[in-house]
Amino acid sequence: MFLQYFSPHPLARAVNRGMLDYWQILSAIALVVGVVGVARTNLMGLIAGKDRINRLTVLAGVMAMPILAWLWGTTAGSPFVWMFEYVQMPMQATVFALLAFFVASASFRGFRARNAQATVLLVSATIILMSRLSFGEGFLSQFQWIGDWMRDNPSMAARRAILIGIGLGSLTTSLRVLLGVERTWLGGSK
Amino acid sequence: MTDLRIRRWIFLGLAVIVVLTMLVPVTTKVTVSPYTQRMYDYIDSLPAHSVVMVSFDHDASSQPEIRPLSLCLLRHAFSRGLKMAGVSFQSEGTVIGYRMIEQTAKEFGREYGVDYVYLGFRPQLQAAILQLGESIRGLYAQDYFGTPLDSIPMLVGIDSLAQIAVVLSIADANNTTHWMEYGKARFNVPIIAGVTASMVTSYDPYLSSGQLSAMVGGLRGAAEYERLLNRHGAGQRGMLAQSATHLYLIALILTGNFIFLRARRGKK
């Protein structure tokens, strides 16, 4: 995969295409392994009598969606799409919306000016929140350019440093694995 | 008051604010940021009939934020006479993406197969992007409805990312990064993005370096785009709720710190 980046030869391209096909096939098989794992764990739990209602709901969901897709397809208006739009989507949106409540609680109980660093974070967060307000073009709109400045300068500098750190870390870990220095992924402790 | 009781009042306050502000039919006026203007100008500058690949790589959970943004970008693209090829590399984005592209196409009287096409879902984003660079037909033999790509008029002569004018990645996580790392770096296709507000700062370095040609983010981005399109939508409608919630959070932060500092002074 790495070498084909440097070769436009038809053979290298053909090998690349073949490997990409296998990549897709392997990920599809991994999905099957995941489904079997979920079903097995929940069936075992059900037999053991633990959290029966929860486990039955999970199993019903795991089985219902493929059956609906198999019987009526996945096109617009099918029962599969109906379940997706009116059951899965609202449930996911609800869980995601709960974050707002946790943020509200955390901003009251945890966001404290305990020391200089915490105070910098607190002031920055408040300015960013102010900069996202939209009450016309009056006094509050002045916070927008301060927020944009913070986004373009201190925030971006920190983000770049993190990205470069991640890149270098990934590179050294990859080299360690390729050169056989790092062998924990094969099992064992060293 | 106990901790649990305080938390309940905070939750109740937030719920009341969000529900009330969503019920009030007031539209707030937003100032258009340079980032949103850059996206608008970018789409505006694309020649008519250029093919835009729209990648719907998001969950159902981010729908309230992603949907208004996606509709703005799709409406702008269709209004400019651009052709769309929809793909999805996240299973949940597949139906959502199709619904949005179909809705906007109908608004502008666009015809399936001629002005837009939907190719559907494929797993493994990185592998899929690399394959799209080699051959679109290698990854998608058929479209979302099972029609062979060779019998779709819009895709005649189009079989790789090289023939795509730009990729619009609509994402709620780091999937746009893969488009830049594999699509842009390997095949030099320009990437533009519509992302959730929480991901905006993650992509700022890419925007600054030019790896990302333009980006618009969050409900605020949608509201700004709606203003540019001169069209009222869910973005502007949701901004009052978002702004009121931000003010509520600021009030909570200030109250929490006031209580904290007073207690600390009391101890001294």
Image (cartoon, coloured by chain):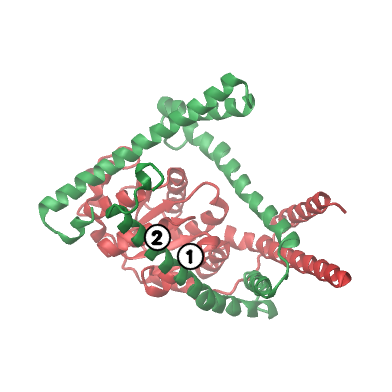
Chain where mark 2 sits: B
Q: Are marks 1 and 2 in contact (CB under 8 Å)?
A: yes
Q: Is residue B120 visible?
A: no
Direction from residue A41 to residue A177 in the image, left or right = left
Of all residues, the one furthest to the front in this rendering is A190
Q: Amino acid at mark 2?
A: Thr
Q: Which residue is mark 1?
A: B202
Q: Nearer the viewer, residue A153 or A173?
A: A173
Task: Measuring from the top left, give residue B131's x and y in whole percent.
Answer: 26, 50
Q: Quadrant of residue B20?
A: bottom right
Q: Is residue B132 visible?
A: yes
As helix, strand or loop, the secondary structure at mark 2 comes to helix
Tell me, for residue B23, which label it has, or none.
none
Direction from residue A60 to residue B246 in the image, left or right = right
Residue A41's place in the image compared with A121, above or below, is above
Same chain for the residues under marks 1 and 2 in the image: yes
Chain where mark 1 sits: B
Task: Measuring from the top left, give residue B121's x and y in whole percent.
Answer: 37, 43
Task: Measuring from the top left, give residue B101's x and y in whole percent.
Answer: 43, 51
Q: Residues within 10 Å of mark 1 (few under 14, many from 20)?
A: some
Tell me, for residue B177, which label it has, or none.
2
Q: Amino acid at mark 1?
A: Ser
Q: Quadrant of residue B253?
A: bottom right
Direction from residue B258 to residue B215 in the image, left or right = left
Chain for colour red: B
Residue B50's place in the image compared with B122, above or below, is below
Q: Quadrant of the N terminus of chain B?
A: bottom right
